[in-house]
Image: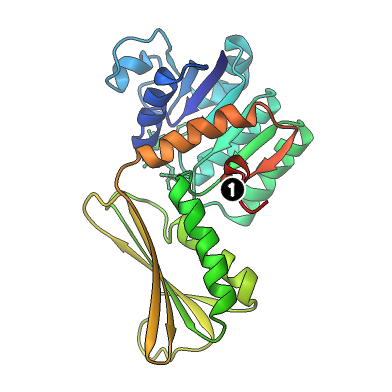
Amino acid sequence: MIRAAVTGACGRMGTLIIQNILAAQDMELSAAFDITNIGMDVGEAVGSGRLGVPISDPADMEFVIKDTGTQVVIDFTIAKAAAGNVVRAANAGANLVVGTTGFNEEHKQQMHRAISDNSVAAVISPNFAVGVNIFWELLKEAAGSLDGFDVEIMEVHHNKKKDAPSGTAVKAAEVINNVLGGRDYVYGRQGIAPREDEIGIHAVRGGDVVGDHTVMFFGDGERIEVRHQAHSRQAFAGGAVRAAGWVMEQPAGVYGMADVLGLGK
Ligand SMILES: NC(=O)c1ccc[n+]([C@@H]2O[C@H](COP(=O)([O-])OP(=O)(O)OC[C@H]3O[C@@H](n4cnc5c(N)ncnc54)[C@H](O)[C@@H]3O)[C@@H](O)[C@H]2O)c1
């Protein structure tokens, strides 16, 4: 049995990931971390019934990981918190699955250093849905065939999402720019803003939208749109728990969801 802990346990994603761990044949919930409901039984906090696993303070993470024999930590929190959580979990020797988005360069360096210094394995992805990973592959192919087309990216998310643009939209821009090269990113437009050789990125927020991403390639007299729509957070939670099983079999290093799915080999 793989012993898995969840950080951000009381959040929208954390709650669903706990349900997925409980349903998995080869995994059990070893610990839960959040900054709310500390000390409360996590099952009671997230409506899954008593589980006998208390919500722990993230500040105690190294001790709790060792004390509970946690082997993998799944983090869906916020960028600033996640970077610290990754360092603590790696220091305690746990493997990692990181779904949190909105990291800056400093966060990324901090996490990569801790993962490498402690020789643990981590899957870090702004999107764990299988379909989104295929979407990124399709963008790669489209960008390679549509040189000279204008590219615009639009993402739509629920009104509680904190970071913008989404990690998935940023990765879509990176995937396209890796093929086309050298394009600047323009985030929304206002005032006099003539279009140059850029990738436009637009974040729309409202209601309870789980996550829509559309990439538009505009040519002369035509356009192609590549779109992914997530109907349920289960698409992400299922992928994250699958990644947690997979990462336990890997040598130390940092991986993406494409590696878990065996894409691009
Ligand atoms: N990679 C993916 O597939 C994917 C999919 C959906 C969401 N996300 C990302 O996951 C993150 C969480 O999304 P959400 O909708 O569940 O947010 P949420 O606000 O519902 O949940 C975040 C939880 O983290 C907790 N938290 C805050 N600081 C913490 C800390 N230091 N230690 C432990 N817990 C802490 C909060 O109390 C809250 O319960 C966001 O960055 C979001 O963009 C990624």
Q: Which residue appears at 64% of the width and 14% of the height?
A: 66
Outermost residue toward the top in this view: 52
Q: Quadrant of residue 180?
A: bottom right
Q: Where does label 1 land, which residue? A: 258
Q: Is residue 238 left or right of residue 254?
A: left
Tell me which amino acid carries mark 1.
Answer: Ala
Q: Position of residue 108 (x, y in %)?
A: 64, 49
Position in image of residue 142 (x %, y %): 52, 72
Front in this rendered view, residue 45 or 208? 208
The one nearer the camera, 161 or 56, is 161
| x, y percent for residue 159 | 27, 53
Q: Is residue 31 left or right of residue 86?
A: left
What kind of element bears circle 1?
Answer: helix
| For residue 168, above or below residue 189 | above
Mark 1 nearby-residue class (10 Å; few <14, some 14–19, many ≥20): some
Q: Quadrant of residue 179?
A: bottom right
Does mark 1's beta carbon lie closer than 8 Å to ligand 1? no
Tell me what residue is drawn at x 59 percent, y 40 percent: 260
